[in-house]
Image (tube, rainbow, N blue to C red):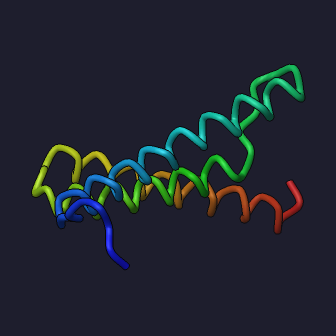
Amino acid sequence: MHFPFEITTTMIWVTIGFIGQGMFFMRFFVQWIASEKEKKSVIPHSFWYFSIAGSLILLIYAIWRQDPVIILGQTTGFIIYFRNLYLINRTKKSGT
């Protein structure tokens, strides 16, 4: 496939970064829609999945950029998002 412009490695990585940011936007969007539906603050499961996806993509992007600030932030967030899903699933299994 021929593009009318040159696609560079940097352009690909910036696109990956924007995709990660898009995942983070989606988590807030689904949380907002769920809360509006229920007329109270709600955090749906999809919030945590979008959080994990966005965090993982942004972590990969940060590693490529060699940005220790973003790497630290995304790594700690990633752990918290998985922990929340673990707690949700454990609660479902125990029935409480």
Depicted 30 relative to depicted 82: above or below: above
Depth check, front residue: 82 or 64: 64
**Residue at point 71%, 29% (across, down):** 32
Horizontally, residue 28 falls left or right of residue 57, namely right
Q: Where does the image place residue 56, in percent across and percent down from the top left?
A: 40, 62
Count of numbered circles in the view: 0
Q: Is residue 10 left or right of residue 1?
A: left
39 relative to 70 in the view: left or right = right
Question: Please, which residue is most extreme toward the top here?
Answer: 39
Camera-side residue: 90 or 66? 66
Q: In x, y percent, where is residue 31?
A: 69, 35
Is 96 on the left-hand or right-hand side of 28? right
Q: What's the residue at 42%, 44% (across, down)?
A: 21
Image spot of residue 15 (x, y percent): 34, 55
**Residue placed most toward the observer, 81 or 28:** 28
Q: Quadrant of residue 35?
A: top right
The structure residue drawn at horizontal position 20% and vertical position 64%, both measured from the top left corner, is: 6
On the image, the x and y values in percent for residue 70 come to 23, 46
Q: Which residue is found at the position 42% from the left and 58% from the top? A: 79
View extreme (bottom): residue: 1
Q: Quadrant of the N terminus?
A: bottom left
